[in-house]
Amino acid sequence: MIHPLHERYARLLVDYCTSVKQGDRVIVSLDVAALDLGRAIYREVLRAGGEPFLRVSYPEQSADFIELATDPLLASEPAMQLAEIRNADAFIRVIASDNATALAGLDTSRLGDKRLAEVNRIRVEKTRWALTLYPTPAAAQAARMSTEAYERFVYGAMFLDDPDPAARWRELGATQQRLVDRLNTASDVHLTGPGTDLRLRVTGRSWANSDGKRNMPSGEVFTSPIEDSAEGVIHFGVPSAVRGSIVEGVTLRFEAGKVVEATAERGQDLLDAQLATDAGARYLGEIGIGTNPHITVPTLSTLFDEKILGTVHLALGRSYVETGGKNESAIHWDLVCDLREGGEIRVDGETLQV
């Protein structure tokens, strides 16, 4: 028997987030710990008239790939993944971490981010996609919460404790749209706070209203800044987890849009490796402003942390084409700056009220 909460969760992902309709081909990619939710999603896609393709990952899968993938494989075109994503109408990804540090100490460059760059580009630009996180004990430990408390936090952030979660997302979307309407006329953004004094330009770029149609939970507005515009320094006080390794206390200095100096209080090697991915990794692909009132504390999950009301996040690497971005990279790495104590966003010289 499927839990009623899982049915509500699946309905939100299929009906609201990805708007699955008759004849749609839908990839459902999930970690095995979320198999119960996966069944609910599979059934919901069928109810909508779609054709679901279930892809389940086991906990050691990435570690096995790092250990055993040959160099010819890493250099090859991912023909199977490309064929699949090119024929998909929608893509639902459910993260369900079994061990948050499973890849710590491994050479994660061998996972093939560059090899899969075209797959990810097609997924983002050509499909209706949704990314979500299923609460597990491992994720709860990373967030320093009990499993029960973490489940309440996760489901609350998605409005799943409401009889009509989609209605709550539409309400938040309407609030965010007013912010988007203001920002679409903006030219200059100035971020200030402890260790932060950064300016960038967004003239002519469009802002997106992230109201749960892609990320679940969501609650942000974002755009891609003009690639050569970032000038100054920014400090990211919220830790970032990258494949089981933690980067903390990152400070970046920009000149003409490019990172020219990068330090981390923890995880310097990983920070350097991310910046060395390709030429685009040293430029910004996104600036986003968090708006979710139910996400109030960092949990070492970017999906949640970047939505914290009172924060701003910048992504190194790949831009969003739909916002006018032109930066290309195999990475899109979000780093979160908390402005709730002594920070401010100024747009064209005026303080922005979120």
Image: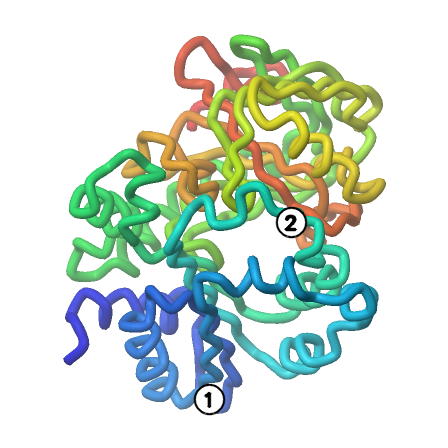
Residue that lies at the very extreme toward the front in this rendered image = 67
Q: What residue appears at the point 33 percent right and 57 percent down from the top-left corner?
A: 134
Where residue 264 sits: x, y (%)? 61, 21
Residue 180 lies left or right of residue 146; in this view the side is right
- Give residue 84's position: percent from left, percent from top: 64, 81
- The front one of 341 and 322 is 341
Front one among 336 and 312:
336
The picture places residue 295, in percent across and down from the top left corner, at 32, 37
- Helix, strand or loop at label 2? It is helix
The secondary structure type at the circle numbered 1 is strand
Q: Which residue lies at the image location 43% right of the left edge and 42% below the top edge?
A: 301
Left of 97 or right of it: where is 256?
right
User: Which circle marks residue 51 in the picture?
Assistant: 1
The kind of residue on which mark 2 rests is Thr
Residue type at mark 1?
Glu
Query: Residues under labels 1 and 2: Cα distance?
Result: 33 Å
Label 1 neighbour load within 10 Å: few <14, some 14-19, many 20+: many
Name the residue beneath numbered marker 2.
108
